Amino acid sequence: MKVLVTGAKGQLGSDVVKELQGRRHEAIGVDIGEMDLTDPAAVSCVLERTKPDAVIHCAAWTAVDAAEDNEEKVHLVNAVGTENIARECKKLGCKMMYISTDYVFDGSGTAPWKPDCKAYKPCNVYGKSKLEGEFAVARFLEKFFIVRIAWVFGKNGNNFVKTMLNLGKTHSSLRVVNDQIGTPTYTPDLARLLVDMIETEKYGYYHATNEGGYISWYDFAEEIFRQAGYETEVVPVTTAEYGLSKARRPLNSRLDKSKLIENGFRPLPDWKDALKRYLAETEH
């Protein structure tokens, strides 16, 4: 299978390319400078030239706080850029996989969000732009996967684990929020699942994070320092007490992943195991 991967140099995209290559698929990775998502002519040129069987769209504006001051740019990348790809996939008759986020929901309540739930109410600019991207994919295509993920960490790019490890070297204690609940997602594990999915025609909306139950960022930080052997004290605080963030964060990022098993897909491993492998692979 020939698969075009956008955001191929990013945290997730790089692992998706690696996973595709490991399975003998032809992976065509594009990133900033190689294809301008916001330019329909540029998108058309790349897809017409490569003629992929499928597109895995990982590229996105993901700087959540910066998005609040750059709404037009974020809309162009996450909404218009996604629509440009969806239009071309429709023309070529190829599959499309769009990587979305728990931020399309408002984060209220405590019940896990189901993948086919339509109670959308993004709580920030980033979430709104990703939801607009979802709408574009569903409007133009029938052969699509929309996969919502949360709390992503991987070897490439910035993430919570890397931030905690860096801060833990210079701080004896750190304040971390304990009222935002979700589950981490390790990019190599997610990449394996995404390629499992793109090899099928089991289209639709899915949620994908690692297994191991729902935790807070405080719980995650505690486990990071425990496994890394740091003595950094983690002080639990509420989101209101923590302050600082420009963009509002969802308190409830619990994602219901039961649809994966119902459709025969193998779930991701436990997040603690994923963290252990991440620390080993990054030599912490």
Image (cartoon, grey):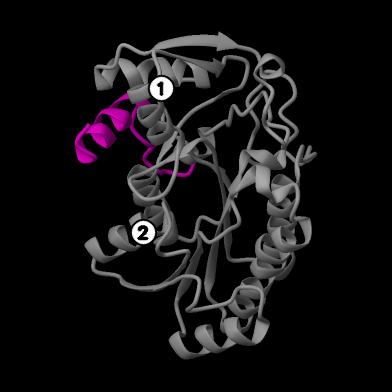
Q: Residue 212 — which label?
A: 1
| Residue 282 lies in quadrant | top left
Expressed as whole percent of the image width and height from the top left, the position of residue 105 reads: 72, 37
| Image quadrant where one finds the C terminus | top left
Identify whether 189 is placed above or below 14. Answer: above
Q: Which residue is mark 2?
A: 14
Identify the residue at horizontal 44%, vertical 21% (top origin).
220
Image spot of residue 245 (x, y percent): 67, 32
Q: Residues within 10 Å of mark 1 (few under 14, many from 20)?
A: some
The residue carrying pointer 2 sits among few (fewer than 14), some (14 to 19) or many (20 or more) residues within 10 Å by Cα, namely many
Q: Amino acid at mark 1?
A: Gly
Q: Secondary structure at mark 2?
A: helix
Residue at 40 percent of width and 32 percent of height:
161
The residue nearer to you, when weighing 195 against 5, is 5
Q: Looking at the picture, which amino acid does disc 2 mark? A: Ser
Q: Quadrant of residue 119?
A: top right
139 to the left or right of 153: right
Label 1 to label 2: alpha-carbon separation: 25 Å
Q: Residue furthest front?
A: 170
Q: What's drawn in magenta, residue-wise?
A: 263-284
